[in-house]
């Protein structure tokens, strides 16, 4: 995990679930995390992005964010859902690679924590793209 913006020990993630997994690339996505923050975050929210990166190109797709809320010091939970992973507008050669889905904890505009999840996209024998999301806690 990458800590940015906090001089103290920083937040930590204790549980993470991203799914469904091993499914069509464009299917719905749900991301849930349990986390602990060492200080109150008065305007806490999570921003979720998909990043497809190749040697010659980097494409960033904003998937959305959670509503801002007060996260008190201590344990917290987040849930993000999107009805489809809308990245099919990217070139197939860029998608058929290893990308990242990132969930970034914000306090207002300040980045507090970034959680990267590797997303492997592969075609099946008919050419349909499937995704596998790797949990960084496993």
Image: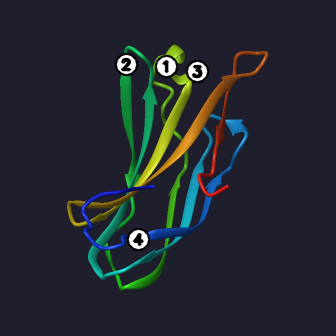
Give the label, 4 or 2, closer to the camera: 4
Q: Residue at x 54, y 66 (%)?
A: 33
Q: How is the image coloured?
A: rainbow
Give the x, y percent position of residue 53. Answer: 43, 26
Assign the C terminus to one quadrant of the image.
bottom right
CA separation in Å, label 3 and label 4:
33 Å
Residue assigned mark 2? 57
Residue at 49% x, 43% y is 101
Does residue 61 sit above or below 135 in this rendering? above
**Residue carrying label 1:** 94
Specify which label sits upstream in the sequence, 1 or 2. 2
Q: Nearer the viewer, residue 113 or 9?
A: 9
Q: Determine the CA span between mark 4 and mark 1.
A: 33 Å
27 relative position to 89: left or right: right
State the residue position of label 4: 11
Q: Is residue 88 left or right of residue 26?
A: left
Q: Secondary structure at mark 1?
A: helix
Q: CA distance from mark 4 to mark 2?
A: 32 Å
> In percent of the image, x 36 and y 34: which residue is there?
60
> Do tag 4 and tag 2 residues touch (Cβ < 8 Å)?
no
Query: Which dot, 4 or 1, sits closer to the camera?
Result: 4
Distance of mark 1 from mark 2, alpha carbons? 8 Å
Secondary structure found at label 4 = loop
Percent of width and height locating residue 95: 53, 23
SS at mark 2 in the image: loop
Mark with earlier residue (2, 3): 2
From the image, tell me which residue sits under label 3. 96
Q: Are marks 1 and 2 in contact (CB under 8 Å)?
A: yes
Tag 4 or tag 3, which sits nearer the N-term?
Answer: 4
């Amino acid at each position: 995990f990458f800590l940015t913006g906090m001089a103290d020990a920083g937040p930590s993630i204790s549980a993470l679930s991203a799914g469904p997994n091993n499914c069509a690339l464009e299917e719905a996505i749900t991301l849930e995390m349990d986390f602990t923050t060492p200080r109150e975050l008065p305007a806490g929210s999570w921003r979720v992005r998909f990043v497809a990166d190749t040697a010659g190109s980097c494409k960033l797709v904003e998937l959305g964010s959670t509503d801002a809320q007060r996260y008190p010091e201590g344990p917290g939970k987040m849930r993000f859902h999107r009805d489809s992973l809308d990245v099919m507008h990217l070139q197939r050669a860029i998608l058929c690679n290893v990308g990242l889905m990132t969930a970034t904890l914000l306090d207002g505009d300040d980045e507090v924590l970034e959680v990267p999840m590797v997303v492997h996209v592969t075609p099946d024998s008919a050419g349909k793209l499937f995704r596998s999301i790797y949990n960084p806690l496993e």
